Amino acid sequence: MPDRTSVCDLLDSTDLEQRTGLQIAWYSLSRESGTDFPRQSCQIDFAQPDDDIADTIMISYAVASHPERSLVEDRRSYAASSKVDSIAMDGLPGEAVSYVEAENEKIVWRSPVGGEVTIGFISNDSTLAAKDPEGAHELLLHILEEVVPIIDEVAAGPQHPVIYFPASPPARRTS
């Protein structure tokens, strides 16, 4: 990935590669902005020496699934256990929680206008999360702090179907 590439119009490739210690192999981005509420989905896949290892981070933004419930209550239905932790988001509006789903940590932020950003590993065999769970948590928090201030504007950008950078991802398992 070239230095300073804007990954999914949200993150700097150089910063993300330095934080993970891995090269970004490819990312995909889709955006639907012609609806009542803009939606965006991003998948970032990191290069690994073994094609059977997949370290993939997913970032999605959509309307809140159950805005009438608290975020903690809502996410308990997704969590592998009933453990859903609130996260203090200094200086950012809304509320955030972390939980584990399918053996992968997820962090969700709900905005005051009813949108939700979900960030997490989607690989069942993520080496990033397995070798350093605390570091993986900090990485997800860093991504959240980068994304929250700009997601409304970015998601409202030009609509397009799934695009890949580079133009087509390598043929390998992603989850």
Image (cartoon, rainbow, N blue to C red):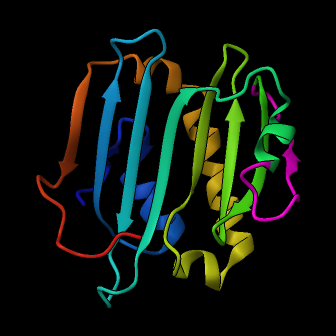
Residue 32 image point, x, y percent: 34, 23
One can see residue 39 in this view: yes
Rendering quarter of residue 129: bottom right
Residue 126 image point, x, y percent: 52, 77
Residue 160 image point, x, y percent: 22, 28
Within the magenta stretch, is there residue 82? yes
Q: Which residues are magenta?
A: 77-92
Looking at the image, residue 148 lies above or below residue 167: above
Is 167 situated left or right of 126 in this image? left
Which residue is rendered at x = 51% and y = 63% of the image? 122
Looking at the image, residue 156 lies above or below residue 2: above
Q: Quadrant of the N terminus?
A: bottom left
Rendering quarter of residue 42: top left
Which residue is rendered at x = 86% and y = 39% of the image? 73
Residue 105 image point, x, y percent: 68, 63
Judge by depth and name the residue closer to the eye, 88 or 109: 109
